[in-house]
Image (cartoon, rainbow, N blue to C red):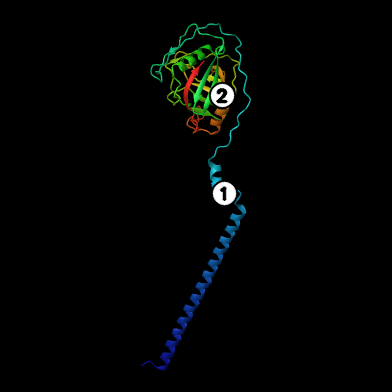
Amino acid sequence: MPTNVQRREQAKRKLERQLVRRAEREKRRRMIAIVATAVTVVVVAGGVYWIATTDFSSTGDDAAASSTTPAPIEIPTEVKAMPTRPTPIADPTSCEYRPSKEPASKEGTKAPEATGVSATGTATATVKANIGELKLTLDRALAPCAVNSFVSLAKQGYFDGSSCHRIGTEGLQMLQCGDPTGTGSGGPGYAFDNETWPELSYGRGYLAMANAGLDQETQKGTNGSQFFIVYGDAQLSPDYTVFGSLDEAGLKLIDEVARAGHDGSFDPSPGGGKPNKEVKFESVTVA
């Protein structure tokens, strides 16, 4: 049996162990309290900063919309007067419609008569489109060969069912149409020369022929069926044949298409993209 001395030694060691454990528990409690206090301070400080810097004037939906909605574009409202050729073209005149490297985008399309083309007077074209009617005035004195081609293609139903494939909203504000393929590469199977002059400039309401510059082999014009409607600014070099105008009611319809924006598919060159709001020609008639 353990002696009294041994029992006292055992009790003393047990008490020492209990005191050590108690001190360790107390140390842990103090550490936990310190950490909890620090975390609380950080959370409170973060909350105060968030409240101080957050703009509560917009909802989450408004913020998302503002990041995806394009900035409104500015469109001039003044329609530019039609230009006048410095030297009238002889009436009647002759045109050259040369076969192009690519076949016609619509089978059976024929080039117009090239001789005895009138260089005076106007024709009216009515485009029935999904967005409303577009009234075009075609001016033979400005560009007899371009007007002759447009009238011929309209009478052949070439433009019917086609969509305007490109719109520009910055720098060059125009809507480009006249390609049945909707790709920007389609044409009527023939090409003809520019009818321009050095002083020519462009403005709201103008109809002008689109082209690919001069043909590298022949150094001749590449006008075909594609044309563009200028609805705003157009700081262009005088390389695009102006052949008529669009009425003010039609321009307002085009403005709405422009405000709807585009998909950027033609950026960075030549610029713009497919209109977000489709413009489709149901029929084009000429009087």
1 horizontally vs 54: left or right: left
Give coordinates of residue 230: x percent, y percent: 56, 24
Label 1 crowd bin: few (<14), some (14–19), many (20+), radius 10 Å: few
- Of 73 and 79, nearer the camera is 79
How many numbered discs sit on the rendered protein? 2
To which quarter of the image does residue 119 belong? Answer: top right
- Residue at (49, 18) in percent of width and height: 285
Give coordinates of residue 163: x percent, y percent: 46, 26
36 horizontally vs 106: left or right: right
Q: Secondary structure at mark 1?
A: loop
105 horizontally vs 65: left or right: left
| The N terminus lies in quadrant | bottom left
Residue at the extreme left: 1
To which quarter of the image does residue 17 belong? Answer: bottom left
- Residue type of the residue flagged with mark 1: Thr
To which quarter of the image does residue 120 belong? Answer: top right
Above or below residue 45? Residue 145 is above
Q: Earlier in the sequence, mark 2 or mark 1?
A: 1
- Residue type of the residue flagged with mark 2: Val
Above or below residue 183? Residue 189 is above
Give coordinates of residue 144: x percent, y percent: 53, 11
Above or below residue 144? Residue 129 is below
Give coordinates of residue 234: x percent, y percent: 58, 24
The span from disc 2 to disc 1 (Cα, nearest Å) is 39 Å
Q: Secondary structure at mark 2?
A: strand
- Residue at (50, 77) in percent of width and height: 23
Label 2 crowd bin: few (<14), some (14–19), many (20+), radius 10 Å: many
Residue 212 visible here:
no
Q: Which mark is residue 59?
A: 1
In the picture of the structure, the residue carrying the numbered disc 2 is 230
- Residue at (41, 90) in percent of width and height: 7
Residue 52 visible here:
yes
